[in-house]
Amino acid sequence: MTDAKIIDGTLFSATLRERIQAQVRDMRDLHHVTPGLAVVLVGEDPASQVYVRTKNKRALEVGMKSFEHTLPADASEHHVLNLIEGLNDDPEVHGILVQLPLPRHIDSQKVIETIRPDKDVDGFHPTNVGRLASGGQAMVPCTPLGCAMLLKDHLGDMKGMNAIVVGRSNIVGKPMVQLLLRENCTVTIAHSQTRDLAAECRRADILVAAVGRPEMIRGDWIKPGATVIDVGINRITLPDGAKKLVGDVCFAEAVKVAGAITPVPGGVGPMTIAVLLRNTLVAASRLHRLPVPEAEGLV
Ligand code: GUN
């Protein structure tokens, strides 16, 4: 069998960002509105600092305003909530993202619930979670929406396909299930307590892996010809001491069996920030009652 087609998230996300840049320019020229994204980081976690810096850089590249708020690790919950309330009321801010995880003394759920739902570009507020589940006008979490865009682009109509989502997090697994249901897939959600995970995976035409365990999903778990979306980004140390990024799927094995697969890096990873920019543009459009750009016909 020939190797799987590689789904190129780097290319897809670059095209999406170019389109967003043109839409931002139109919005500014025609309606005098510049979308603004505020990112809040509490503490000095190096990985989070890199993410936040990249988000700001990408927002500026497409012509948006970017507001970065960095608070010390010992900032009080009250301080964070006050900052969010200010951003909720700021007319220049259309999207608010609080980088997770937060330090343990801060209640993440309370922070998420303080963000105005129409500025919640992460789609984590219960109002948006509920709207996604019940078919309303939601802000949709960035990583699963990026996965759904890649699937739609590769497969087109997904009606009646068997899909499995491995992992049940609020950030990826659960919203991914909702997006696949919207596409009329028959969806299984698997997790750490699932019996015979390999057998469940072998039934799937679409497999989305979001468990955070390096190379857990093996080649012989995959149905021949299936489409595999690997959300995992795991840093491992090789026997010679070198570091390497791997996904939740054993790529070298899976590429021999699947019909198409996302690589790590260069698959789902770059989609997340591109969709964050898209969500910010959507939030700005809705807040100013302007036409809302489509997400590949998905939401
Ligand atoms: N930390 C890891 N992924 C995410 C995400 O999608 N949004 C936020 N806010 N924090 C994260």
Image (cartoon, rainbow, N blue to C red):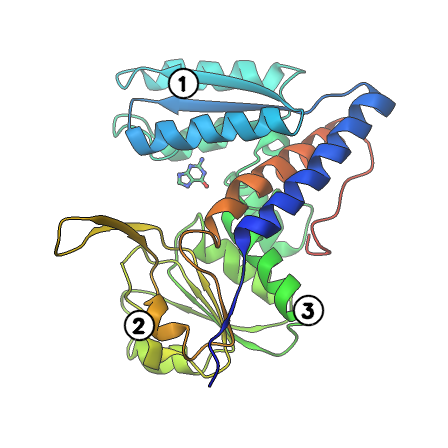
Q: Which residue is mark 1?
A: 80
State which tag comes first along the sequence, 2 or 1: 1
Q: Find the distance from the CA under tag 2 to the CA under tag 3.
A: 29 Å
Q: Label 3 sits on what residue type?
A: Gly
Q: Quadrant of residue 192?
A: bottom left
Place of residue 297 in the rendered image (x, y in percent of width and height, measured from the top left): 73, 56
Q: Between disc 2 and disc 3, whose residue precedes?
A: 3
**What amino acid is labelled 1 in the image?**
Val
Q: Residue at x 57, y 38 (%)?
A: 276
Residue 94, located in which quarter of the rendered image? top right
Circle nearer the N terminus (3, 1): 1
* Residue 91 screen position, x and y as percent: 67, 16
- x and y percent of residue 198 in the render? 32, 79
> With 15 as the anchor, is 224 left or right in this view?
left
Q: Write the residue at 64% across / 72% down.
A: 158
Residue contact at pointers 3 and 1, CB within 8 angstroms: no
Distance from Cα at disc 3 to Cα at disc 1 = 42 Å
Mark yes or no: residue 72 visible. Answer: yes
In front of the other: 86 or 66: 66
Q: Could you tell me which secondary element the residue under label 1 belongs to?
A: helix
Q: Which residue is mark 3?
A: 156
Spatial CA distance of label 2 from label 1 is 38 Å
The residue positioned farthest toward the bottom in the image shown:
1
Q: Is residue 287 above or below residue 208?
A: above
How many neighbours does mark 2 have within 10 angstroms: few (below 14), some (14-19), or many (20 or more)?
few
| Residues tagged 2 and 3 counted as in contact (Cβ below 8 A) | no
Q: Amino acid at mark 2?
A: Thr
Q: Residue at x 30, y 72 (%)?
A: 194
